[in-house]
Amino acid sequence: MSQSSSLVHNAYDNLIEANYPMAKIIDKFKEIDPMCRLGKCYGYQNVLYSLIQPVIEKSTSSSYVDLMHNHIFDPLKMERSSLGYDAFLETPNHAEPHVLTRKGWVKTKVKPSYYKILPAAGVNASVADMSKWILAQMGAFPDAYSPAVIEMVTTKRIRTRKEMRKRNWRSILKNAHYGYGWRIYDVGGEELVYHDGSVAGFRTEVAYSKEKDLALVILLNAETKMGSNLNAEFWTEIFKPEPKPKVVKAKIVRKKTTRIARSMVPRDKPSLIPASE
């Protein structure tokens, strides 16, 4: 959950896109040499992250889909949210993915292979529903998301040095960590909880600041960097330091005085009085 499995980034995501059976993909993990000791370095994973699904299902004796509806979608009234490829197609009003080609933006088909990893890439949601979900993350619905759960998932678990090199964030980013499913950014001493993601034809950006009492959700049906650029620009503006008030020093203007020589002072009477004739 904290993306600190010690394995290379995005291990076997290419096999997901190639529609390999999950059992074969999982079996191949034994061929990977770790980069470090377990829990000591960051390596983002989708396949391993999604192994939480069978763990939850076995421990609760419920399906992952049912659990998501019972504990998240229904309590938050996320009426246009679902999981899975079939559920996406059954929604009449859904966005179609677009990819950039030499001829410009072209509509493409949704890849069903992504839905093999439901926790990482299997949720369908409208921007209105995502707004409800992000409000829950900020504490607006404590019955669905308790303060203890929010603190647990946003506690810094592993430092993510790679994030510090992101071109559109590096001017304001002071530090970066990963929690449980969330990135935690230090922006000028304030905390920004953030995540992004993409699959062929879609891009998602979500972020919130409890200090600013503000959140941003961006859903795009095009695989473009515009979303990440917009997100970074938005928070750069929000966290811009307040300009220091200019202290204007008052200039003291001294009155000019004319120094008068003694010889210029008029006398009451002349020094010599001429004798009368």
Image (spheres, grey):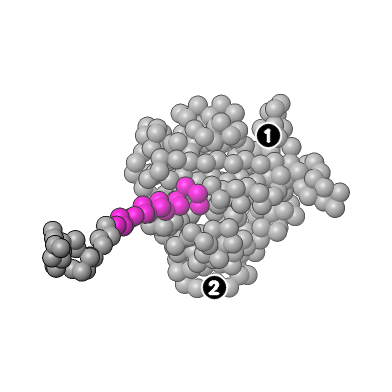
Q: Label 2: few (<14), some or many (≥20) within 10 Å? A: some
Q: Nearer the viewer, residue 80 or 128?
A: 128
Is 189 positioned to the left or the right of 225 in the image?
Answer: left
Q: Which residues are magenta?
A: 235-253
Q: Label 2 near label 1: C-beta < 8 Å? A: no
Along the polypeptide, which appears first: circle 1 or circle 2?
2
Q: Position of residue 161 (x, y in %)?
A: 50, 67
Residue 40 location, quadrant? bottom left
Q: Which residue is mark 1?
A: 88
Residue 274 location, quadrant? bottom left
Q: Position of residue 128 (x, y in %)?
A: 56, 31
Q: Position of residue 84 (x, y in %)?
A: 64, 38
**Which residue is at a point 61% across and 70% down the rendered structure image?**
32
Numbered badge on residue 191: none
Which residue lies most toward the front here?
277
Give the SS element for disc 1. helix
The type of residue carrying mark 1 is Phe
* Residue 113 in sight here: no
**Which residue is at a point 14% across and 62% down the rendered structure image?**
276
Main secondary-structure element of the magenta-colored stretch = loop
**Which residue is at a point 53% across and 47% down the rendered structure image?**
234
Q: Position of residue 153 (x, y in %)?
A: 42, 49
208 is within the stretch colored magenta: no
**Which residue is at a point 71% across and 26% down the rendered structure image?**
92
Q: Which residue is mark 2?
A: 35
Q: Is residue 124 above or below residue 177?
A: above
* Residue 34 in sight here: yes
Q: Nearer the viewer, residue 11 or 191?
A: 191
Q: Label 1: few (<14), some or many (≥20) within 10 Å? A: many
